[in-house]
Image (cartoon, coloured by chain):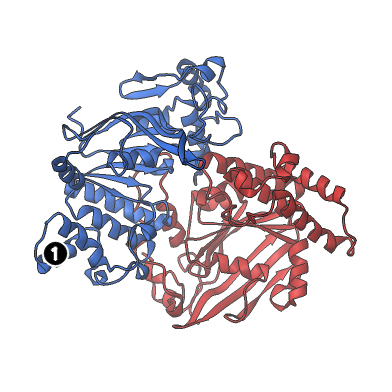
Amino acid sequence: MSEPILGVENLVKYFPVRSGLLHRISGYVKAVDGVSFDVQPGEIFGLVGESGSGKSTVAKTVVQLYELTSGKIHFKGKDVTRLSKQTSKWFRREAQMVFQDPRSSLNPRRSIASTLEDPLIIYGIAKSRREREKIIRTLLQQVEMSSRYMYKYPSALSGGQRQRVAIARALAVNPSFLALDEPTSALDVSVQAKLIGLFVRLKEELNLSYLFITHNLSLIRTIATRAAVMYVGRIYELGPVDRLFNHPVHPYTKTLIAAAPVVTQEEERVKPRQMSKEGEVPSPVTPPSGCAFHPRCQLADSVCAEKLPELTEIELGHFVRCHHVALSTADEGSSE
Amino acid sequence: MTERPVLLDIRDLHVWFRVYEGLSKVLDGVSLHVREAERVGLVGETGCGKTVAMKAAMGTLKSPPALFPAGEVLLTGKDVLKMSPAEILNMKGKTIAMIFQDPLSSLNPVFTIGQQMFDVIRYGHRRTSNGKRPTRAQLRSSAVEALASVRLPDPERMLKSYPLELSGGMRQRALIAMALVNRPRLLIADEPGTALDVTVQAQILNLLKALVKDAGIAVLMITHDLGVVREIAERVYIMYAGQVVETGPAAEILDAPQHPYTQGLLASVPRLTGGVLAEGIPGTVPDYTEAPSGCRFHPRCPHQMDRCVQRKPSLAETSTGRLVSCYLYSEETDE
C-alpha cells in the first residue's frame, strides 16, 4: 500500500459532562475511544454505525473542528495532531468537510456567491472581485449547477442544490481530502443518486479522497472501497467492503446488515443471520463494560462483559474486535 | 386470496390549493383503496402528494385553502369530505389511528406517558360506551396491557415516565401502543421509524407488523423508503407528482418495476449487493402551479411520446394485480 493521505492512530475524544452549580466536570462522554484507520489516496473510506456510535465525532476531530483528547493524526506524511499556525492554514485548506443538513450549514441570509466568496477571501485565493466571480462560476460548474443561481439565496434552492453549494464551498480552497458526514441522508433517493454520481466524478477529476460517513449500509457497499463499523466509540470491524458484506464476522456487523431495509429479493438472500437480541444502542456516557455489544449479542459470555477484545487482523486488511471470531466465522456457512 | 371488504376507498381524488402564485393542483386523480386487515404502502418522494392524500383521508385538510374539485374519500362507505366536524372526530377515535415519523414531537413533553394514554383511552371509551366514564382501574389496566403488548419493559413504571426519559425506540413503541389501544380498523403510519437507527427501526417494523396481523388491523404506510415498504406492505402504490403511476403486490413491483418513474426510482436505490448506482432521474419534481399536462412524469421520461403530453394514461392491468399508468403498457389510443 502506498503512503496513506490520512492516518489516524488511537484517536480519543471525550466531551466533559458538567453538572451542579459550579459546572464541575462530573463525567465524560466517551464519544470516540481509541479509533485507528487510514485513508489511501483516491480512496472512499466508509464509516458506518448507528447514532451515538461516534462516527460524526471522528470526522469532526479528523478535520480538527474538535480538538482531540489524545491520539495522533497524520496527513500527507505530516503530523497534524497539534496544529501550529503554519500547518493550520495548510491543513485546513487540504481537508474540508461537508455536513448532513445543507439547510443549517448554509447561512440563509447570504447569497450563494457570498457564501462561496468567503473561503476565497480568507485564503487569499483571488484578490479581485472579478477573479472571485470567475472562480465561483467554475465552482458551480464543477458541482453541475447553473451560474444563474449565483445571486440566489439558500431558501430558493432545493435540498439537492443546497448540498451542491455546500460541496462547492468545500472545493473552493482546492482540498485533497473531504470528510463527508451523511451528505445525502436528508435527500430523496433519486437526488441522492445524482449527488453520489457527482462525488465519484469529482473524486476522479480533482484527485480527492473521502472519508464517507453514513448509516446507510447499501450506500457504503456501492461506493466505498473499505469501511469501518463503529459502535459506541470504537471500531468493531474494518475491511474491504466486499469482505465486510460477503463475509461479515462481528455479530454487530451481521446485525446491522441484517437490519438494513432492502428493496429486492436478491438482497434479502445475501443478508446474514440476525445476531442480536432486542435492545438499543447504549449511551456513550455509560458504555457497557468489555465489548460494548455484549448486552445485545447472542454469542456473549462472561469474558465479553469483562474484557474488551482487541481489534485483530483475521485476514489481510480485515480486522475484527470479537472474542468469538472463530465462532462467528463458523456460523457463516449456515447463513448462506 | 379471498377479497376482503374495502375499508378506505379514495376515488379519483383531486386536491387543489389556492396559493399566491395561483392554483396549486397537487392531487390529480388519485385512486387507492385499503381492504380490511390489509397492509398497503404509499410510496413517493418528497412533495409527491402522499401526505396530502393521507390528510384528506383523515379529514384534516382545511378548506380553504384546500379545494376538492373532484373525487371522494370513502371510509367504510361514507364520504369523509362531506362529513361534519363532529362526524370526523367520531371517526378518528374509532376507525382510524395514526402514528407519525418523529415520536418526540407527537408526544406532549409535560405529561407522563400514562396521562397521555389515559386521555386516548377515555376518548375511545366515550365513543364506544355511550358516555360512561371508565374507572381509574380500567384506565390503568388497559394502558398497562397496551404497553406490554408493544413489549415495553416494566409498563407500570412506564406510565409514570415522561417522554424525554425514554429512548427513541421506546417512544415509538409507546406511540404504537396509544394508536392501537382503542382497536382502530385502520392505522395510518407516516414514515414510522425513519428517525430511528436501523436496528431499532427493524425491531419496530417487525413489532408493528406482528401487532396489526394479530389484531386484523389494516395499515396504510406512507413512506419514501422502499426498503421499509418491502418489510411491511403486501400491496403498494407508487406516487409521482400527485398521480398514482403504478400499483400492485409490493415484492413484484420492487423486483420488476414497470412504470418508467418506478424504474428510475428503484435504479437510484443503492443495493446491499453492491453494483453500479444509476444516476437518478433527470430533471426535478414539477411545480404544482404549472404541473405538466397529461402524464406528469413526461418531461423527465426517457420514453416520452406525443400522447403522454396530451392525456393522462389510465391505470391499465399489465399482469395479475398490477396496474400501471403508462402508454408503454396500454393499447389506449386517442379518439
Q: Is residue B34 above or below residue B52?
A: above
Q: Residues within 10 Å of mark 1 (few under 14, many from 20)?
A: some
Residue sitting nearer the eye, B313 or B300: B300
> Where residue B210 sits in the image (x, y, percent)?
69, 43
Amino acid identity at mark 1: Arg
Residue at 17% across, 29% down: A2
Residue indicated by mark 1: A132
Q: Which chain is assigned red? A: B
Helix, strand or loop at mark 1: helix
On-image quarter of the N terminus of chain A = top left
Q: Quadrant of residue A3?
A: top left
Q: Which chain is assigned blue? A: A
> Where residue B29 sits in the image (x, y, percent)?
57, 74
Q: Which of the chains bears the disc numbered 1?
A: A
Residue at 47% across, 61% down: B45
Left or right of A161, for residue A245 = right
Residue sitting nearer the eye, B321 or A150: A150
